[in-house]
Amino acid sequence: MSQLVEKEVVETEAVETKINPILASSAQSIEAYQEAITQSSQAVMQWLQQPEMYQGKTVAELRERITLDFNPQGLGNQVAIERAIEYFLKDSLSVHHPQCVAHLHCPSLVVSQAAEVLINATNQSMDSWDQSPSATIIEMKLIEWLRTQVGYQSGDAGVFTSGGTQSNLMGLMLARDAFFARQGHSIQQDGLVGNLKKIKVFCSENAHFSVQKNMALLGLGYQCVTLVKTDRFARMDLNDLAEKVALAKVNGEQILAIVATAGTTDAGAIDPLRAIATLAAEHQIWVHVDAAWGGALLLSEKYRDYLDGIELVDSITLDFHKQFFQTISCGAFLLKEARHYELMRYQAAYLNSEFDEAQGVPNLVSKSLQTTRRFDALKLWMGLEALGQQQYAAIIDHGVTLAQQVAQYVDEHASLELVMQPQLASVLFRSRPQQVATADNATIALLNQRIGDALLESGRANVGVTEFDGVTCLKLTLLNPTVSLDDVKVLLALVESTAQQLLTA
């Protein structure tokens, strides 16, 4: 060995010995891992106990505070973790805080945190079986189990996803491809063909924005999305749907899919799934259900009937990082008929070869829009193992029941106005103190916007501000199973006192 080569080897070994950057089997690596995990977990435990929901820093303050000034030589694990604690952890939102209720952003199960440790340490990649042997089988069995909860036939047509937007994209993509396949066209081979302006997708006016976003990605644009009116409960209006389907036929338009929603973002409304599926079947229209939120009721003991008819639809979106209490991200896409997967089939010799398929080797890349993919399914599996279906049902039902109690409480207070009776775990209301009781909507809207902003800036609470049916209102999303009615009463008192402070300032 030349002196030059020998010198390079010695120097490389010295650097590796000093930094310990890689998780591996050596005693030194395992010790470094243990130290890093211990340091991080201790910091998290301290952070969990801080009384404030948020430290209250503004966007401008965070921009000034957080800088990227990387040391060319590196600082080592301990200092890197210390800096993450100082600049990230301390200024993070406490999602577990009882007054953090603005969004569909749940506190997570302890066992989900443990699952993340296993997922990250093993670093399995779910695209091929030889990169994730046991993980592949666990995910497939979980998909089978989820299909059973829905009422689908046995099988494993489905896959875990990053969440609702991706699952909705898969449902709409397969609906599009099936639509063109019935007309003798292969989207994979030929791309989009024909008079595309005559192709329509129907969804309610309260459906998630990802419907429009995904139709743009799929090449049909916002213009293809027809919004169906909603009833007084924010559910898709069946009469308007039937009229629009009939009108589309008169106009020579073709309906690619109907997207029903089981749990709209604000009102938590669940469209009449059985009736929609029945109407769609008469016209051979694909039905996709966005059950990113409401899908949690699959495990409910009290409210499962809200999802009546979900077993009839062609594809389903589920999110487990909402009311299944899993860490972000964790979602799934379910497909009623496995044959439709042929529409997105693509073989890469190094991942899902014909030889593997002939041998029965399951390579999940064939079912996913992603190639490299985390083993997020482990979180749901461990959650079900730890809690069991009964306890899971109890914490899911708690949020829905609590929302009903809070709505009644709001209704009894003169300075608060209930905007919508809750269906899932959200309450829409607005502050309407006596001083502005007769004011116009714009004045009341501005007050409620300022209340939401002031609460977050103070670090005391994070209350949603949204617009529903033309009314600017506040939103409580009550996903936290540790929160009681008394906790919410404290928050509502804070809303009322903040309103008074703003009106007298």
Image: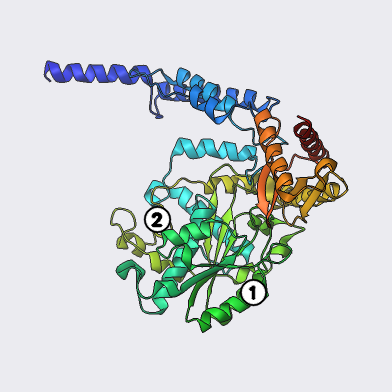
The quadrant of the picture occupied by the C terminus is top right
The residue positioned 72% from the left and 36% from the top of the image is 99
Estimate the x, y position of residue 432 in percent, counting from the top left. Answer: 80, 45
The dot on residue 185 is none
Residue extending farthest left: 2
User: Is residue 259 shown to the viewer in this render?
Assistant: no
Q: Which residue is mark 1?
A: 240
Which residue matches tag 2? Answer: 365
Coloring applied to the structure: rainbow
Quadrant, the N terminus: top left
Tell me if label 1 and label 2 are in contact, CB under 8 Å.
Answer: no
Q: Distance from label 1 to label 2 (Cα)?
A: 40 Å
Q: Residue at x 65, y 44 (%)?
A: 386
Query: Of the residues tagged 1 and 2, which is closer to the observer?
Result: 1
Q: Position of residue 29 (x, y in %)?
A: 41, 24
Lateral position of residue 180 relative to residue 93, left or right = left
Element class at badge 1 = helix
SS at circle 2: helix
Say which residue appears at 51% left-offset and 62% top-offset: 156
Residue farthest to the bottom, as pictured:
250
